């Protein structure tokens, strides 16, 4: 019987897990001095970055100020943000845009200036974009640069299982140092060891814990779950952002209708009645922050027994709509919806994980030699609700911060000692894959029903009870059978769901994205929810 890996471990100076905006930014900044390996779960362009439609927020408009962008971010985050982190990210935004332009990202222009659009929660036009497919353009530019760099090795189809830490050294140690990762190679069906002096988690969020999500299928909270199991603190996981407007279509899942449709004049209406309801809810109407809009839509759907509400921009000139939203317009035409002439059926869907691995402003986690950047982290930028188009921005600023810290402190990052190979001598191949599919579906359904846009203590306790029952089943399965990508994801999905529910039960107030019927008031002092392993 195969007792695990026989191949020598893959070794590099720095290991980056994730090939989106955060991971590739870190890799490109490190590659001037170091050998960098970037591993991706699937194809190199399959992460959340490529899916980002809206754009990147930056102060570029005359009359706009850093202070205004900072305040908009703090207001959206319901005071839970770390102001020093917000200042750092906002003030580095224009430089990040310049770097992306140099990499060849073809941002839309208006004369000699960049074209800026406006999104909910922003007091100015400050969203630079590439039509309505900004993320894909950014992803392509970063990947092109990474492929051209001789110091960067890109490895697709590697499903990470767990961090390799001091506990996995040939000479066992409890020091908690991170030396790399064990990953399942989809091509060979073998587990391989990647080691490095420093490891960077850029693994994205945990959106697929929910039944309806705009996140790509790989967003199962892998980095968050691995960091938690290895000993990192996790913060604010109850702050799950639900995007107000995901296309309602039983055949097409996860197609997001960007915030910019509302920013450019789209109205939310009750189907058939045609009543525009957002002005009844908030003076900012459709431009209110996402949590307000998502709750309002959720309320109307439940109150009236609807499947969806309408998002209508058909009152704008057809050429204006086609020019601003070419990707969405073309996709909807394929589904026999002409957004220049008729409304779009939309529902809220999970969209962004505002909590995650606790990091400082250098991207350092609690564990030696482990860094993190992007959606898998809680940096203090987003607080209780992410402001639109601050997410890609966070990836660029923290990707660079991580690289800068690793480079400046390289002499404190020793090379990895001998690490034990993955041992599968006591497991067999599974003959019951249906168990994984059943548990996966159950998690996503009860998370949607019990831990969604509106919560209650009773619903959260029901979810916690389900998680406890499933944990025994999943742990037993994991202990007896060889790992597969589906089993790895299920294990991380369950861990992520547990962290979300525990965090939500801990917060005895409603703030930002966390709205509970039992504690509708907001407490005077904003306090992070921090879970300690």
Image (cartoon, rainbow, N blue to C red):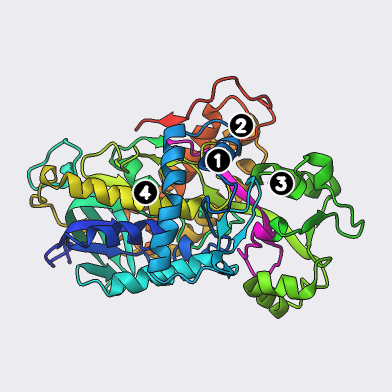
- Judging by the rendered image, the residue that carries numbered circle 4 is 398
In the picture, measured across the screen, residue 92 lies left or right of residue 76, that is left
Task: Tell me which residue sits at (49%, 63%) in the image.
Answer: 217
Q: Real-space Cα distance between discs 3 and 2?
A: 15 Å
In the picture, measured across the screen, residue 2 lies left or right of residue 430, that is left
Q: Earlier in the sequence, mark 1 or mark 3?
A: 1
Q: Range of the magenta residues?
A: 235-260
Q: Mark 2 and mark 3 in contact (Cβ < 8 Å)?
A: no
Q: Earlier in the sequence, mark 1 or mark 2?
A: 1
* Residue 411, position as x, y percentages in the image: 10, 45
Along the line of sight, the residue nearer the viewer: 240 or 289: 289
- Judging by the rendered image, the residue that carries numbered circle 3 is 293
Which of label 3 and label 4 is nearer to you? 4
- Judging by the rendered image, the residue that carries numbered circle 1 is 73
Instruction: Label 2: state its secondary structure.
Output: loop
Instruction: Label 1: state its secondary structure.
Output: helix
Q: Earlier in the sequence, mark 4 or mark 1?
A: 1
Q: Quadrant of residue 524 in the image?
A: top right
Q: Real-space Cα distance between discs 1 and 3?
A: 17 Å
- Judging by the rendered image, the residue that carries numbered circle 2 is 511
Q: Real-space Cα distance between discs 1 and 2?
A: 15 Å
Q: Residues within 10 Å of mark 4 (few under 14, many from 20)?
A: many
Q: Is residue 286 visible?
A: yes
Which of label 1 and label 2 is nearer to you? 1
Task: Tell me which residue sits at (75%, 43%) in the image.
Answer: 284
Along the line of sight, the residue nearer the viewer: 65 or 222: 65
Q: Real-space Cα distance between discs 4 and 1?
A: 17 Å
Task: Tell me which residue sits at (72%, 78%) in the image.
Answer: 333
Q: Real-space Cα distance between discs 3 and 4?
A: 29 Å
């Amino acid at each position: 019987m195969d007792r695990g890996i026989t191949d020598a471990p893959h070794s590099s100076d720095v290991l980056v897990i994730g090939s989106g905006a955060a991971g590739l930014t870190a890799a490109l900044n490190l590659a001037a001095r170091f050998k960098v390996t970037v591993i991706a779960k699937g194809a190199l362009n399959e992460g959340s970055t490529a899916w980002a439609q809206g754009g990147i927020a930056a102060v570029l408009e005359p009359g706009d100020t850093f202070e205004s962008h900072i305040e908009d971010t703090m207001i959206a985050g319901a005071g839970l943000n770390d102001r020093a982190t917000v200042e750092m990210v906002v003030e580095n935004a224009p430089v990040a845009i310049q770097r992306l332009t140099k990499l060849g990202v073809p941002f839309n222009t208006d004369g000699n200036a960049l074209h800026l659009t406006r999104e909910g929660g922003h007091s100015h036009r400050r969203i630079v974009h590439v039509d309505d497919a900004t993320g894909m353009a950014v992803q392509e530019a970063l990947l092109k640069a990474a492929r051209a760099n001789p110091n960067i090795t890109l490895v697709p189809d590697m499903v990470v299982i767990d961090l390799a830490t001091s506990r996995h050294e040939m000479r066992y140690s409890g020091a908690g140092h991170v030396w790399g990762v064990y990953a399942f190679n989809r091509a060979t069906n073998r587990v391989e060891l990647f080691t490095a002096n420093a490891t960077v988690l850029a693994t994205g969020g945990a959106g697929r814990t929910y039944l309806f999500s705009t996140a790509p299928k790989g967003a199962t909270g892998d980095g968050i779950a691995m960091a938690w199991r290895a000993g990192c603190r996790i913060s604010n996981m109850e702050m799950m952002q639900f995007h107000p407007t995901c296309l309602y279509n039983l055949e097409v899942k996860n197609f997001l209708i960007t915030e910019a449709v509302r920013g450019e004049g789209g109205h939310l209406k009750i189907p058939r009645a045609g009543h525009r309801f957002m002005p009844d809810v908030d003076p900012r109407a459709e431009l209110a922050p996402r949590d307000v809009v998502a709750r309002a839509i959720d309320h109307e759907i439940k109150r009236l027994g609807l499947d969806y509400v309408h998002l209508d921009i058909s009152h704008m000139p057809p050429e204006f709509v086609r020019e601003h939203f070419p990707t969405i317009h073309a996709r909807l035409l394929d589904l026999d919806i002409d957004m220049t002439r008729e409304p779009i059926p939309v529902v809220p869907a999970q969209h962004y994980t505002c909590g995650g691995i606790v990091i400082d402003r250098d991207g350092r986690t609690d564990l030696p030699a482990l860094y993190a950047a992007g959606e898998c982290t809680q940096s203090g930028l987003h607080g209780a609700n992410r402001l639109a188009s601050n997410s890609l921005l966070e990836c660029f600023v923290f990707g660079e911060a991580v690289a800068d810290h690793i480079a400046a402190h390289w002499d404190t990052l020793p090379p990895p000692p001998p690490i034990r190979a993955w041992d599968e001598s006591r497991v067999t191949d599974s003959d019951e894959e249906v168990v994984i599919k059943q548990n996966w579906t159950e998690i996503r359904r009860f998370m949607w029903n019990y831990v969604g846009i509106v919560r209650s203590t009773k619903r959260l306790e029901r979810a916690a009870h389900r998680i406890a029952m499933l944990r025994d089943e999943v742990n037993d399965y994991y202990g007896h059978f060889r790992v597969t990508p589906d089993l790895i994801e299920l294990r991380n999905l369950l861990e992520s769901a547990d962290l979300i529910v525990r965090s939500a039960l801990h917060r005895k107030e409603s703030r930002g994205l966390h709205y509970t019927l039992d504690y509708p008031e907001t407490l005077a002092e904003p306090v992070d929810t921090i879970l300690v392993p």
